[in-house]
C-alpha cells in the first residue's frame, strides 16, 4: 500500500461500474449497489478530535473522483459469483486485487482475478473515505493497494506450518 497526502473527494455523481466483464454475477452487482449506497449514506467523520473540520477548506477545493471502474485481469474466462468463490475453499479462488485511486480526479480502478477479489477491493475502497459538510473525501490520494490473502493455501500451506 502506498498513499499520498493530497485531498480528493467523491463527486456528487460518483458511480461504480464494470468494464470488460461479459456477464456480471448477481451477487457482484448487488455488492456494487451496496457499496454505492454505503458511500452516499455512511457519513463517517474522520477519527480526529475535530472530526475533520480542520480539513474542510482543503477538501472543498480538491479534485473530484467521478467513478471507480471494476475489471478483471486479462485472459480470464467465465466469472463465477462471489459466493461460489467463497465456498470453493481456502486457496482455491484467487482473491488478489489492485486498487488505484489517482490524485487528479481521473477514474479509480479496481482490478482482480475473481468476483471475490473485486468484492474484497470494494470493501477496502469503502473504508478509505470520510464525510464532512456534505462531502465524502480522503486526505491520502493518490492511493495504490495490492492485496492478497496472507495464507493462500489454508492451514496445510507452508505459510501456516508453524501453527501446528
Image (cartoon, helix red, strand yellow):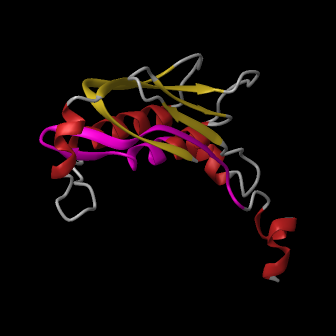
Range covered by the magenta-colored residues: 122-150
Residue 85 placement, left or right of 128:
right
Q: Position of residue 99 (x, y in %)?
A: 55, 37
Seen at 64% across and 53% down, the residue is 87
Q: Is residue 114 above or below residue 95?
A: above
Seen at 58% across and 48% down, the residue is 1
Q: Is residue 19 magenta?
A: no
Comparing 43 with 105, the one in front is 105
Task: Check the image and name the residue furthest to the bottom.
Answer: 164
Q: Is residue 148 magenta?
A: yes
Screen quadrant of the C terminus = bottom right
Q: Position of residue 128 (x, y in %)?
A: 39, 47
Residue 136 placement, left or right of 16:
left
Q: Position of residue 38 (x, y in %)?
A: 29, 43
Seen at 29% across and 33% down, the residue is 9
Q: Is residue 92 above or below residue 36?
A: below
Amino acid at each position: 500500500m502506498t498513499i499520498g497526502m493530497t485531498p480528493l473527494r467523491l463527486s456528487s455523481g460518483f458511480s461504480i461500474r464494470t468494464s470488460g466483464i461479459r456477464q456480471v454475477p448477481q451477487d457482484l452487482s448487488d455488492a456494487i449497489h451496496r457499496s454505492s449506497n454505503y458511500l452516499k449514506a455512511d457519513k463517517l467523520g474522520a477519527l480526529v478530535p475535530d472530526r475533520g473540520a480542520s480539513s474542510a477548506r482543503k477538501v472543498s477545493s480538491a479534485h473530484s473522483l467521478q467513478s471507480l471502474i471494476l475489471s478483471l485481469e486479462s485472459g480470464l474466462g467465465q466469472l463465477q459469483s462471489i459466493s461460489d468463490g467463497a465456498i470453493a475453499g481456502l486457496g482455491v479462488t484467487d482473491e488478489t486485487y489492485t486498487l488505484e485511486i489517482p490524485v487528479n480526479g481521473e477514474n479509480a480502478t479496481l482490478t482482480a482475478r475473481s468476483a471475490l477479489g473485486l468484492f474484497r477491493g470494494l470493501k477496502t475502497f469503502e473504508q478509505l473515505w470520510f464525510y464532512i459538510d456534505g462531502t465524502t473525501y480522503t486526505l491520502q490520494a493518490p492511493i495504490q493497494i495490492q492485496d492478497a490473502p496472507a495464507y493462500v493455501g489454508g492451514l496445510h500451506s507452508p505459510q501456516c506450518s508453524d501453527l501446528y
